[in-house]
Amino acid sequence: MFEYYSLLRILRRKRVFPIAILLLPSKDGLTWETYKETLFDEELLNFRYARVGIRSLLSEIYLQKPDAVAAALAVLMKYRKPRSAEIKLAALRKIIESDLTAGDKLFLIDFVEVYVPTGKLTAATEDDMQKLAELETTWVTRALQEGLEKGLEKGREEGQQEGQHKVLLYFLTVKFGPLPPEFVEKVKKITDEQAIQAIIQQALLTNTLAELKLPAPVDEQ
């Protein structure tokens, strides 16, 4: 934690509030930890950081807060009732209705899906599952599609395909993390707008970059 803090402090040149979020159970609420360094029997460093045992917090409280990040983290917290589908639905709605950018929303939505995959929900009613299906196939897809279409339109106005590629690579980076250079080069060779939209649809349904199938370049077909 001290190393992370030091790097951020140097890079950002701003004060940093260090918080460690623990996913382990039985780590109650908010506590403070101390890291010390000594040399020649002298104390050189006394670094304190907050530690949050997130699974000991109550999800219903944080879902009431007007904060999309708090809503996303709420899926990791304990529930008064074993209704993980209901909690996930509330978290996704809070994220999608927030004022965050499309990229930030996609990051939080993916976070929720990783920790509470729809296929492994327990104690879910048929109504909850139907609402989740409608949200994931309609609201999420629409939000991403609108972001893509704006980028494509901007690319057309500039008379460049570069704008289209930037939007596509941006969404893929948010979804899968840093992209290999050879993958980026393949994407830049794609010139068909429908193919770009098809890749976005694939990305919504896959968990890893390896599962994504890119169309062959025109000169290779």
Image (cartoon, helix red, strand yellow):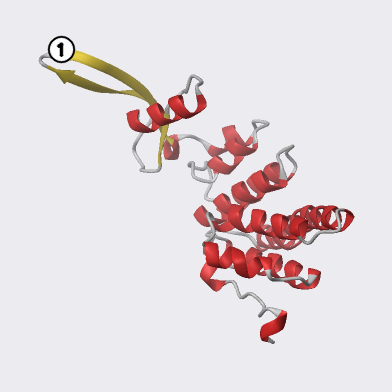
Q: Is residue 61 above or below residue 217?
A: above
Whether residue 34 sits left or right of residue 76 in the image: it is: left
- At a point 14% along the width and 18% down the height, the residue shown is 39
Q: Position of residue 111 (x, y in %)?
A: 55, 50
Looking at the picture, tell me which residue is in the foreground, 58 or 16: 16
- At a point 71% along the width and 60% down the height, the residue shown is 165
Using the rendered image of the protein, determine whether residue 83 is visible from the camera's viewpoint: no
Q: Quadrant of the C terminus?
A: bottom right
Determine which residue is flagged by label 1: 42
Type of the residue with mark 1: Glu
Judged from this view, the residue extending furthest toward the right is 157
The image quarter containing residue 25 is: top left
Q: Position of residue 146 (x, y in %)?
A: 81, 54
Q: Position of residue 163 (x, y in %)?
A: 76, 55
Looking at the picture, tell me which residue is in the foreground, 125 or 133: 133
Judged from this view, the residue extending furthest toward the top is 42
Looking at the picture, tell me which residue is in the foreground, 106 or 12: 12
